[in-house]
Amino acid sequence: MAGGGLAGQIARRDDISVEDFVRDFLEPNVPVVLGPRFTDGWTARRLWVTADGRPDYARLAALYGDAQVPVAECGTAFFSDQQRTTMPFSAFVEAWQRGPRAGLYCKDWHFARHGAAPQAYAPAPPLSNDWLNVFYDHGAPELDDDYRFCYMGGDGTWTPFHEDVFRSYSWSANICGAKQWLLVAPGQNELFTDQTGSWVYDMTAPDEARFPRARQARRIEFVQHAGETVFVPSGWWHQVRNIGDTISINHNWANEFNLRFLYARLKDDMAAVRHALRDAVDMDGFAEHAQLVLRADSGTDYRAFFRFVDYMARLYLRELGGGSGGVELRGLAPHFRAEPSLRRALRLVAAVLDQLAADPAARELEQLPADIARTRALVAGAVDDPPPA
């Protein structure tokens, strides 16, 4: 069945066209495992592992030993995450080789900043429509950020139950080793959250006194093997545990198909902020103060979200107008740069801009309503009256 997976089994595709991936997985927001074909040519799969498929510790240390990397202590909970520290990559590799008892997991390492990414891999064409990293690379370089990560850890290292940042998509490609995945379909938050907004830490062993219905959540459990890539759609909470010594390359990403989910998450977070600050709602400057709290809690705010949408809309308008998106869109598969896809994307952008324009939290911010209206008019001129075929 197209999409599949909703009855407890993950869909798998050894090969798939961009068009079929959009139809069967992006648009319906359904997970899938892509076969090793999509990573067979990656340098990382040749140079980061030994002939028997294990991490090449010596080569990795030689390549990246001086990098400072974030490391999670998997045996120590810290609120909804794990205790984190930072250490030289060479020191992490030494601890990693001592075996799983160390419980150390190099995770969320922005390895692209160390020059590894361009040589190590290239996203599969169906996963190339990555607005989030286009924006951070070209639209906001002063932020010095991206959403490309490398994860490395021994047997049993793991990531607790969570939803991805901004309610973005993610993909995770195994360079070596295997991962045990648990995915929970959207719309079930009431089963694994409590009245304070806290959620289950370990979905395989929930605190049943706090979360008595957690085990009722519909889930998909499966193993991802070396070379395979998992697509995690927006709003699918998940938990992952390594089987053996494992390396993966991961992206968080977004595009026109999940833009509405990103906005819905932002709006939900804004509602939570306003509720928390309800006793101060009449103070001078409340709207701007609420945005500051929103950014601190969620990593973004209304102006930052609009800046992201506006930037991508203008790139697409330039491409549609017969120009070129230039280097910014060069990494997207041709399907995503074809005229029908550009128009479809801009229609979806327009729908989100309409919602944003009507949002009271946006309307009370200085200059933002005028900026939204200006971009909406540009987009409308491109998609509301398309030229005849």
Image (cartoon, rainbow, N blue to C red):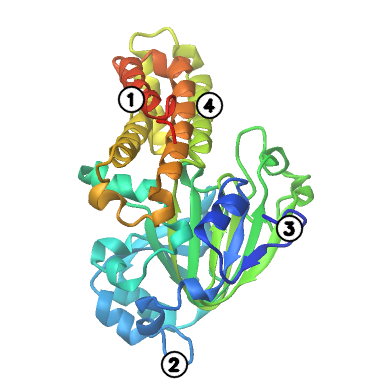
Q: Hey, which residue is sitting farthest front in the picture?
A: 389
The amino acid sitting under disc 3 is: Met
Circles 1 and 2 in contact, beta carbons < 8 Å: no
Quarter where residue 308 is shown: top left
Circles 2 and 4 in contact, beta carbons < 8 Å: no
Task: Identify the residue under disc 4.
Answer: 272
For the C terminus, the image quarter is top left
Q: Which mark is residue 123?
A: none
Counting residues from the N terminus, which is met first, the one under dot 3 or under dot 2? 3
The picture places residue 272, in percent across and down from the top left corner, at 53, 26
The picture places residue 113, in percent across and down from the top left corner, at 25, 61
Counting residues from the N terminus, which is met first, the one under dot 1 or under dot 3? 3
The amino acid sitting under disc 4 is: Ala
Counting residues from the N terminus, which is met first, the one under dot 4 or under dot 3? 3
For mark 4, does the 10 Å Cα neighbourhood hold few (<14), some (14 to 19), or many (20 or more) residues?
some
Task: Identify the residue under disc 2.
Answer: 51
Image vertical order of residue 325 relative to residue 103, above or below: above
For mark 2, does the 10 Å Cα neighbourhood hold few (<14), some (14 to 19), or many (20 or more) residues?
few
The amino acid sitting under disc 1 is: Leu
The picture places residue 198, in percent across and down from the top left corner, at 60, 40
Task: Identify the residue under disc 1.
Answer: 378
